[in-house]
Image (cartoon, coloured by chain):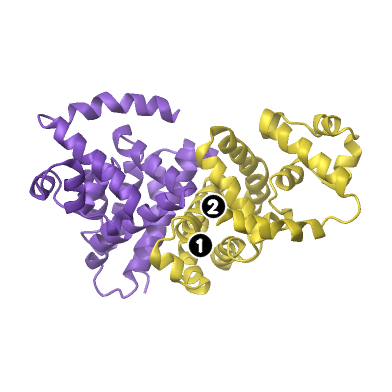
Chain colours: A yellow, B purple
Amino acid sequence: MPSDAASQVTPVRRGRRPGTNDTRATILDAARSRFAEDGYSAATIRRIASDAGVDSALVMRFYRSKGDLFAAAMSVPPEALQRLSDAFDGPTETIGERVTRAYLTLWESDPIEFEPLLAMFRSAVNHEQAAAELREFLQARFLEGIVPRLENRPDAALRVSTVSSMLLGVVVGRRIVRVKPVVDEDLDTLVKLVSPAVQTILTAP
Amino acid sequence: MPSDAASQVTPVRRGRRPGTNDTRATILDAARSRFAEDGYSAATIRRIASDAGVDSALVMRFYRSKGDLFAAAMSVPPEALQRLSDAFDGPTETIGERVTRAYLTLWESDPIEFEPLLAMFRSAVNHEQAAAELREFLQARFLEGIVPRLENRPDAALRVSTVSSMLLGVVVGRRIVRVKPVVDEDLDTLVKLVSPAVQTILTAP
């Protein structure tokens, strides 16, 4: 099943890289190897650029930051991550609903978005190196982007990672283990059921 | 790391099988192969007994039911599952706290209990056959044992599986991906944070 989805993904993704295909692909290959070898923290833009035979400025022109480059190398679309972290902005009273919907929708829609996430998660579950990369990435990029949005909460990082873990669990139940009632339910019912729980964890005193 | 834990597990587990070691081991081997080949639903006690060269009554004497035999074959201690489903009994006002604590404690303590669960989960994430087995097992045994305890809730199965998925997610964050704040927190703080969310999902109107 994953291989079917992967074969659907490739042609579409190619359509999204206009013009400078080869250079981008070379940079992404270099980044993938470097992140795999050194891990997220130790890998540098300078070193990846050197591996790819280009200069750092060009890498930064294509990918604004090391985080975006990692996301691209792992094929997690930066827009998807952006939508997730944007869900944390807005009125506190509805943060649970926004975050739940953004997170669960991410894995429902476009296979281009969720298949790489599934692949990343699958590797992380079975390989310590991949888990370390996912962990560093989540901490450095996802958490650090979101936590400042929850002002006045000394334990914001704990709350955000607990919520992320819980929502990931719902996705695992729905998309991987596929436990019957969680799979069959439509997204709105699931969002309605889960949102108050997420609201509680993010905002309880 | 998993291999370290596994090597610690073996001698202890042997100590738990007094006397009829060989017959039990033969039955478990037969069950493991049969469940793997036919899946949980299609596999029968009769067939497993025949594969093992014993009669069905002996299999039933060692393992009370097909569910217990599967749990034993997958090395999930039946007592652990029992503690989990027992947590659903008792006053409704505190069900969230009981279920959260029972579930999270299961993966904290004895490696004999959580390592097989981790192994089962790891297989399920990467192999559709293992996912199918885990799914059938959860539906046939875990859910059917718990759902009748939540009377008057037409959507009890959805609530229980959503909660199980969410708690599994917390365990994945804590034990597998090991996102920093979720790993570092002591169990009581985590239970205190997550319980109201579980309470909400299980009991909200």
- Where residue A136 sits, quadrant-wise, is top right
Q: Which percent across, then down, holds residue B121?
A: 41, 46
Q: Which percent across, then down, holds residue B72?
A: 24, 43
Question: Which residue is the site of mark 1?
Answer: A199
Q: Is residue A108 left or right of residue A72?
A: left
Q: Residue at x 56, y 38 (%)?
A: A131
Check disc 1 and give the amino acid type: Gln
Camera-side residue: B93 or B80? Answer: B80
Q: Residue at x 52, y 45 (%)?
A: A158
Decide: few, some or many residues near mark 1? Use Cα within 10 Å; few <14, some 14-19, many ≥20. Answer: many
Q: Does dot 2 land on a helix, a strand or a loop?
A: helix
Q: Residue at x 59, y 39 (%)?
A: A135
Decide: few, some or many residues near mark 2? Use Cα within 10 Å; few <14, some 14-19, many ≥20. Answer: many
Question: Which residue is the site of mark 2?
Answer: A164
Camera-side residue: B145 or A2? Answer: A2
Asked whether the residues under marks 1 and 2 belong to the same chain, the reply is yes
CA gap, disc 1 to disc 2?
A: 12 Å
Asked if one can make out residue B17 in the rendered structure from this viewpoint, the answer is: no
Camera-side residue: A140 or A113? Answer: A113
Camera-side residue: B42 or A14? Answer: B42
The chain ID associated with circle 2 is A
Picture disc at residue A110: none
Check disc 2 and give the amino acid type: Ser
Q: Which percent across, then down, holds residue A181?
A: 39, 67
Task: Please state, as top left, top right, bottom left or bottom right, where the N terminus of chain A lies in the image.
Answer: bottom right
Q: Is residue B118 left or right of residue A48?
A: left
